[in-house]
Amino acid sequence: MTSYGTIPTSSSPSGNPVNLEYISRAKERIKDGLATRRPWREMFNLHCFNLPSASGAFSRIKTNLAFFRMNYAMIVLLILFLSLLWHPISLIVFIVMMAIWLFLYFLRDEPLVIFGRLITDRVVLIVLSLVTIVVLLFTHATINILVALLVGVVLVLIHAAVRKTDDLYVDEEAAGGLLRSTGGPS
């Protein structure tokens, strides 16, 4: 009696369609995740910069931090990355943390739920920032990290203070609860 093997249903021998599907889904998630980032042109529109009044600076900072939070996170992370180029161990740790950032903050297309509780983007941003800093401090690049964070925060705050908010439309729900109310444009 002759025995015949089963006919494979996959047209590819090593499961490449699964790998291609995974890569395709990853590309889509990257596109979708980066879609929440505001256009850099909008962020650096030269017609939207002027010095705020003393009372309007805090309102601008609050609004701009909510509106451009993804862009600001990317800027601070880039500055931190550049500061670690001369510390290979710290750079490796940073790259691992960036992968975690990608999956938990930048590329997440569904709300994060842990133990049945919804975790807001703001909480994810704060926790990831603190964990990244603490883990990097264990690599003994403390001065580089602190200087990079200081430079990043100062640049973000300066931009947020001088960028007018007249043309920005931020609703509280989309801002992840970062804004309580928006005063008039400043």
Image (cartoon, rainbow, N blue to C red):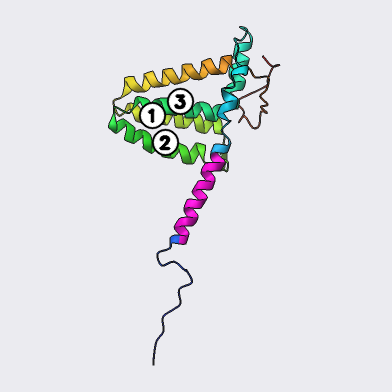
Q: Residue 66 in magenta?
A: no
Three-letter residue code for mark 3: Val
Residue at mark 3: 76
Please give the label number shown on residue 155: none
Marks 1/2 in contact by CB < 8 Å: the verdict is yes
Discs 1/2, front: 1
> Which sits earlier in the primary sequence, circle 1 or circle 2?
1
Q: Indicate the position of residue 140 as horizontal and vertical percent values.
A: 28, 25
Q: Is residue 169 left or right of residue 33?
A: right
Question: Of 73 and 135, which appears nearest the observer?
Answer: 73
Whether residue 55 appears in this view of the structure is: yes
Q: Is residue 129 left or right of residue 86?
A: right
> Which sits earlier in the primary sequence, circle 2 or circle 3?
3
Magenta stretch? 17-33
63 lies above or below 10: above
Three-letter residue code for mark 1: Phe
Q: Is the magenta region chiefly helix, strand or loop? A: helix
Residue at mark 2: 98
> Which sits earlier in the primary sequence, circle 1 or circle 3?
3
In which quarter of the view is residue 91 placed? top left
Residue at mark 1: 81
Q: Secondary structure beneath disc 2?
A: helix
In which quarter of the view is residue 160 placed? top right
Taking the spot 53% from the left edge, 45% from the top edge, the residue there is 29
Residue count near mark 1 (Cα–Cα under 10 Å), binned few <14, some 14–19, many ≥20: some
Marks 2/3 in contact by CB < 8 Å: the verdict is no
Q: Secondary structure beneath disc 1?
A: helix
Q: Could you tell me how far apart the alpha carbons at marks 1 and 2 are, in whole angstroms? A: 10 Å
Taking the spot 39% from the left edge, 26% from the top edge, the residue there is 80
Q: Residue furthest bottom?
A: 1
